[in-house]
Amino acid sequence: MPGSTTTAALERAVHRYRRAPLLARWFVHGRAFLSDLARVEEYVPRHGFVVDLGCGHGLFANLLAEASPRRRILGLDIDDRKIAVARATIAGRDELRFEVSDVIHVPPPRCDAVTIVDVLYLLPFEEQERVLRNAATALAEGAPLIVKSQEARIDPRYALTYAQEVITVSLGFTRGGSSRFHFPSRETALAMFERAGFRAEAVDMRRRPYTDVLYLARRSPAA
Ligand SMILES: C[S@@+](CC[C@H](N)C(=O)[O-])C[C@H]1O[C@@H](n2cnc3c(N)ncnc32)[C@H](O)[C@@H]1O
């Protein structure tokens, strides 16, 4: 369970969107309520340069900043409208930056940690692996990559996971997806991390009614 400090940081992060357009505000509140971001935050190093790939409106990046002032954070997303909303939350803070970028085709800058929260399922498996390979180029040996995802498995939670994504994408809240989603099994995901240059372990996240999994990966030694 996330501690009260992280929960308070999430509340402060959400508060940063109080002047955002109504739809973006709803979406951010929905993400804060449904996505267990506070739990993910606890696995991210407390200091250093963190790059959040597919940052959306920047809620997780804001949470990282609120939870530890010793982090510097860059959020990257392909959706320029979301980046505009994210930038409006910065309000003079130097430790937080947002840029438009296609994380399949542009590797992130050199950094101390990479995070990817609820993004990979929008991409076909080959592109997911490419994003992970790109992350590997940005990290030193042993540096962390933290990925929150959902896994395909025979489970009513998986039907709910899939149905919710159909709704958010068809309402236009999420861009970048094709007509279907790409949730790997845990075995497929772990093999993908290994091919991309990481040693990864999976941690179950069972607090929400989805098949959420957290992959905690570390950059392998160069071959
Ligand atoms: C479900 S949202 C998650 C946003 C954010 N990580 C969060 O936790 O709130 C998925 C995000 O992935 C972004 N995305 C999809 N394909 C992308 C790509 N090729 N490059 C960068 N961002 C991408 C979408 O624009 C969207 O903002």
Image (spheres, rainbow, N blue to C red):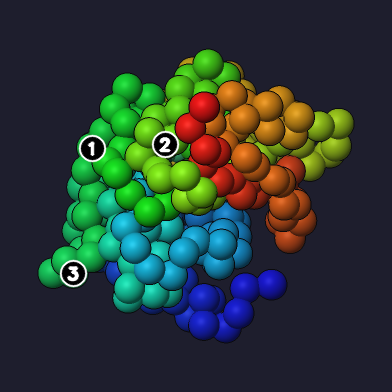
Which label lies toward us, 2 or 1?
2
- The residue identified by callout 1 is 100
- The residue identified by callout 3 is 93
Local SS, label 3: loop
Residue that sits furthest to the bottom in the current view: 4
- The residue identified by callout 2 is 135
| Within-10-Å neighbours for mark 2: few <14, some 14–19, many 20+ | many
Q: Report the amino acid beneath label 3.
A: Arg
First along the sequence among labels 2 and 3: 3
In the depicted structure, whether residue 32 falls above or below residue 136: below
In the image, is 200 to the left or to the right of 72? Answer: right
Local SS, label 2: helix
First along the sequence among labels 1 and 3: 3
Can residue 123 be seen by looking at this rendering? no
Local SS, label 1: strand
Q: Report the amino acid beneath label 2.
A: Ala
- Marks 1/3: CA–CA distance: 19 Å
How many labels sit on residues?
A: 3
